Image (cartoon, coloured by chain):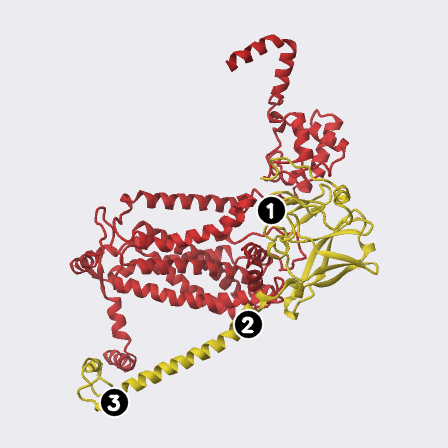
Amino acid sequence: MTPSEQLPPPDQTSTEPQPDSVKDPSIAAGHSRRVFLFKLALAVNGVVGFVLAIPIIGYLLGPALKKTAADNSWINLGPLSDFPEGETRLVNYRNPITTEWDGQTGDIPCWVRRVSGETFQVFAINCAHLGCPVRWFAQSKLFLCPCHGGAYYADGARASGPPERGLFEYTHKISSGALLISAGRMPTLANEAKNVTPLIQIETRIEGSPAARLSATDQPQPRCSSCQT
Amino acid sequence: MPDLKQRGLEVYNWFEARLGLGAPLIEVAEHEVPSNTASWWYVFGSAATVIFVLQIMTGILLALVYAPTASNAWNSLQFLDHNVRLGWFLRAMHGWGSDFMVAIVLIHMVQVFLFGAYKFPRELTWIIGVFLLLLTLGMAFTGQVLRFDQDAYWGLGIGASILSRVPLIGGPLVGLMLGGPIIAGNTLSRFFALHVFVIPGTLIAMVGMHVWMVLRLGINDYPMPGRLVKKSTYQQEYHELEKKTGIPFVPDAAWKDAAFAAAIMLAVIGCALWFGPFGPSGQPDPTIIQTAPKPDYFFLWLYAVLAYLPPSLETPVLFIMPVIGIAALILLPLLSGEGEKHVSRRPAAVLIVTVLAVSLGIFTHLGTYTPWSPIMNAWTSDPIPVSYLHNRTPLEREGALVLQNKQCRNCHSIGGEGGLRGPALDAVAGHMTEDQIIRQVLQGGGNMPAYGNALNPSETTALVKFLTTLRGNELQPAIDASRHVVSASANAPQPTDSQQTKETR
């Protein structure tokens, strides 16, 4: 360090411990006032922080607090003639809530099964295990998942593999000759699982007495004790 | 020349008089460390830091071109790979850098564990290191999402599906993760914010604390069997060791760190040049379902675990195991802060590391070829070996057609080709009777779907007839042992009865 530089010498801090003896006593007298003002200022900052936190947390949690019903709306999948009876077809739709910059991610596929006449089933593409895209194999009448090998029967019931339940189903209706589904949110166990008992699926949409329902459920699933493990 | 040197010194002094950082930094660099810490085992921490700096630099360079929107991210990666000069190389460096960083952080952690370096007084250094590992894994996962391709899209789906299993608040958590009702633009934006701002910022702060504590508390002295750590005496012993055997960290100890860091950087460059960048795989278009999503290398073990867990155990294991694991890592130095450091006197430590390494290694290896996944095109691409069709009746050959046409091959291999989800069928008739095969095909069970609805009676007959011809190297066909007993007892009921009564007595 050049001595000509007019900078505080580095050892200045060591002289600081005894300034009180030199200082004006009035400076020390004002100490408690300044401590109080500092604490007051801190308290004001705390209030400001709290006021700020409300909109920030609201902004952050916005997407978490939305109800499923608010996202879902009726989507037209096309005229009934698009769906031959007894076949299961892949249909793409544009999600009702999208932005311009969502690009291809706003297009969602689903499996439409026309059982007969006006009886339909519309399955989500997402495997009930971990959401991978299931594929339909018409020959063996199975949906297979490429990720961990979950398998489902034609009616969406669990056949084998790691899924705990059958495929997620969209609510659908037929209106002026077209098939409509209620969709908008990615189906997961959190928003779809509640109305389904794991591993055992009985069609609830069929009208009539319990006995009629049971007899109407096509394709009763053969089960054995080892299937359920 | 001396004039120039004098000039340089003056410039340095001008800055030093104002900044005052040079002298303390030199002091830190030259501080004495016990000579036994100058070990090749002690180079991983600094190497991880060097790679972290590489990741920050390559990351900033990639961010100059990358477009973090769902509609353009994939295209901008293609642009980086093909239209930006050396863009592919930077992507490759960043990708390989990430793999090397995870690997070196893990090696560093294992080394610290086996050397007992987490013990008093370095408990907090270890605890912060645990968070550094979690943050590094967080960087790896969010980085994989930013490579916004098919794997990233469905990987997000897997992440959302896992979160949705959280009891009570699963739904809101999924919304929080996706930033909207589906995997889309908002999802990518928030992972971009996490990968570029939140996690790196936290990482830098924590790396700073980690290094600060290493400097403050000293590098862990090389363990000696029998030299126990005691809270009352350790600091004094360490200072004595420092005084007795101290060498300046730079350059006497640091040359090994520098040499290893250079070797690692060369390895990253080599991998980047030789193997190139990771992906991107197909476009992030959910309507293209012909895909088999897979996570990046360091998450393959988790992918495998999720395939093998029984359904009923999956949710508990997913949420209880990580909590236990992280809690154990954090509590480790607090519960075992004293005592033996040397690995030869800590068999439990060696056992834990071995078991974890072997299981993670096995699961990762399984994850590389996913035997649990059906091979979706096996039924149209893998032929039945000709020898299995020789000398077969027309009905049996028809059965081979049924086997092919009903996608059995997607899960069952024949002649070494086909899926590995179910057992190979080459010798199925050697251990299953015709009746058992019929029952298994029609009713399924043991992780096989029931085919009762997908096969008509004649198809079933043909298929089963074909399967009964598959006996490997001409093994004896399986027989029903009970038939034998029944027929024997029908012929001679008396002796069996007397035998049974004898046994019961």
**Looking at the colours in the rendered structure, which chain would you say is drawn in red?**
B
Indicate which label's residue lies in the foreground, 1 or 3: 3
Residue A198 at x, y percent in the picture: 62, 47
Q: Mark 2 sits on what residue?
A: A59
Q: CA distance from mark 3 to mark 2?
A: 46 Å
Q: CA distance from mark 1 to mark 2?
A: 34 Å
What residue appears at the point 25 percent right and 88 percent down from the top-left corner? A29
Instruction: Mark 1 and mark 2 in contact? Answer it, CB < 8 Å.
Output: no
Q: Is residue B482 above or below residue A228?
A: above
Q: Earlier in the sequence, mark 3 or mark 2?
A: 3
What residue appears at the point 47 percent right and 68 percent down from the top-left corner? B198
- Indicate the colour of chain A: yellow
Residue B7 at x, y percent in the picture: 27, 81
Q: Mark 3 sits on what residue?
A: A27
Quadrant showing the N terminus of chain B: bottom left
Instruction: From the viewer's perspective, tell me whether residue B343 is left or right of residue B441.
Output: left
Residue B247 at x, y percent in the picture: 21, 61
Q: Residues within 10 Å of mark 3 (few under 14, many from 20)?
A: few
Residue B492 at x, y percent in the picture: 63, 8
Q: Secondary structure at mark 3?
A: helix
**Are the numbered discs 1 and 2 placed on the same chain, yes or no?**
yes
What residue appears at the point 42 percent right and 56 percent down from the top-left corner? B267
